[in-house]
Amino acid sequence: MKPWLLNILACPIDKHHPLDAYFFRWSDLEEVDSIASGSKIVSSLKEGNRILEKQFKTGVISLPALKVIHDLSGSSAAEKLLRGALETLEDVDPKTFDALHKYLNMVDVAEGLLVCPECGRWFPVGCAVESIPELMPDELREREPELTWLEKWSSKIPAKVLETGLPFRP
């Protein structure tokens, strides 16, 4: 899942936006490292910055959605990218969009959790298929695989989700 998806994802139950995001594992840490260090040459940055500037002006980018990201992956490179992206949000200047573009568009979350702060439902990212957010209504969710996935990441999952999260808890 590209982090930019947080701009458009909403709870399938109550349509709340933004969803709280917890990132546990990145698809390719070497890729994250090379992007964060600047060693990867990015030919699309100029075009990406132009697109980001347009998205800010038209309101496509949801600042609240990006401010509720919690990177729990333990990757210092991912933390650096997130910090740079959030600094860009504090002082929206098209000249500094590089960090935001890199974070939103160039790295993939392999596993994580989306939580609706309104209804308390949690949705895995990467449970059935790596990097795919699984925003399913309760009646279509598979209890056992999701509970197994929840147990796998229980040390990083907020206590509130484990204690009162819907549609089911461990």
Image: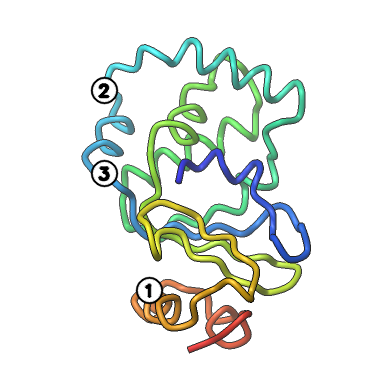
Label 2, residues with CA under 10 Å away: few <14, some 14-19, many ≥20? few
Q: CA distance from mark 1 to mark 2?
A: 31 Å
Q: Nearer the viewer, mark 3 or mark 2?
A: 3
Q: Nearer the viewer, residue 153 or 146?
A: 146
**Which residue lies at the image location 49% right of the left edge and 76% below the top edge?**
142
Q: Position of residue 39 (x, y in %)?
A: 24, 23
Amino acid identity at mark 1: Trp
Is residue 50 positioned above or below 129 on the image? above
Residue 40 — which label? Answer: 2
Residue 65 rendering spot, x and y as whole percentages: 65, 47
Going by the numbered disc 3, the residue's amino acid type is Asp
Q: Secondary structure at mark 1?
A: loop
Residue type, mark 2 in image:
Lys
Give the labeled residue for mark 1.
153
Q: Quadrant of residue 28?
A: top left
Q: Residue at x 68, y 40 (%)?
A: 63
Q: Residue at x 40, y 77 (%)?
A: 145
Q: Which residue is mark 3?
A: 28
Residue at left offset 50%, top offset 43%: 3
Real-space Cα separation, disc 3 to disc 2, in angstroms = 14 Å
116 vs 144: above or below: above
What is the crowding at mark 1: few (fewer than 14 residues within 10 Å), some, or many (at least 20)? some
Query: In this view, which residue lies farthest toward the front?
Result: 140
Asked if 136 appears above or below 10 in the picture, the reply is below
Which percent across, then down, holds residue 129?
37, 57
Q: Secondary structure at mark 3?
A: loop
Which of pointers 1 and 2 indicates the residue nearer the eye? 1
